[in-house]
Amino acid sequence: MSASSSSSLFNLSLIRFRSLSSPRFLRLPPSPLRFGSISPRKFRAFSGTAMTTDAKDAGMDAVQRRLMFEDECILVDETDRVVGHDSKYNCHLMENIEAKNLLHRAFSVFLFNSNYELLLQQRSKAKVTFPLVWTNTCCSHPLYRDSELIEENALGVRNAAQRKLLDELGIVAEDVPVDEFTPLGRMLYKAPSDGKWGEHELDYLLFIVRDVKVEPNPDEVAEIKYVSREGLKELVRKADAGEEGLKLSPWFRLVVDNFLMKWWDHVEKGTLGEAVDMKTIHKL
């Protein structure tokens, strides 16, 4: 073989090597882990769930599907101690909730205007769990990221609430400063949505009184309304009677039945601080 032929083959091999080594061929999974601050037992092992469920859930709304696979929920034990993290998808599969007892941290916002009316939303038809049910202002999860893992004064959860109020209802951060949220308590509950999906949450209950501009995101919210106490009682009556096909989310109903009316008194009196109990985790 001539020197020129050898050189050509070497250059061709080099080109192939560079092509295969090009960054656009590398697919490195994103990692939200803080390696310096958590132990290895809290790592979520890669199981290929996203790939195996891809075809099965092809009919899922594109936005909701992206959130189900990209969002990492905070796994906790029944004392609210962080024990790891997993995808929103895995955390809401009833088979995981029942078999693995997966429990994740959540929050529920109750926003009142200056007339002390409570803002409610009807969840979008596209929602994977509990579509088209009526619920409190905003319900979601803090994610496994530094800003939403802050334990002191539930700051991580309050940061998450501010983020989701913008995502779901178009309420800008300036209208809902994190310092204005009052965490009143925590509850632990489990609720199936259908045969496949469900909730198992340790839920922070956040109250805030603000007049805000609302621009609902149709991917998240079908309808909104402000209700007085009497308006809420009528809504509950209709749900109980099965009128108009109206349904309430299970977590909202638990709050209505156990806490809301007495806490509403404190909202109107400006004494929410007197109702705070963040030491107790109510198992409902």
Image (cartoon, helix red, strand yellow):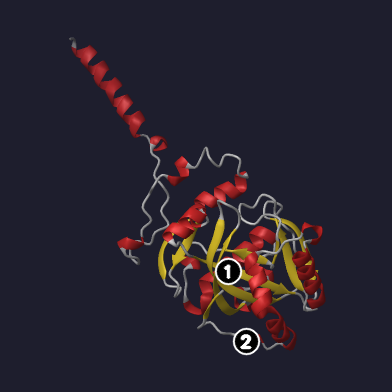
Which label number is shown at residue 275? 2
Rendered location of residue 25, percent (x, y): 39, 35
**Total residue callouts:** 2
Closest to the observer, 122 or 195: 195
Whether residue 199 sits left or right of residue 248 in the image: it is: left
Q: Secondary structure at mark 1?
A: strand
Whether residue 238 sits left or right of residue 174 in the image: it is: right
Residue located 19% across and 13% down the image = 3
In the picture, the quarter occupied by the N terminus is: top left
Question: Distance between the Cα atoms at labels 1 and 2?
Answer: 17 Å
Is there any visible trace of residue 61 in the rendered image?
A: yes
Read off the residue under disc 1: 107
Whether residue 218 sits left or right of residue 75 in the image: it is: right
Instruction: Name the amino acid type tagged 2.
Output: Ala
Query: Do labels 1 and 2 touch, CB within 8 Å?
Result: no
Rendered location of residue 171, percent (x, y): 69, 64
Picture layout, residue 39 above or below residue 87: below
Instruction: Name the amino acid type tagged 1.
Output: Phe
Picture layout, residue 268 above or below residue 196: below
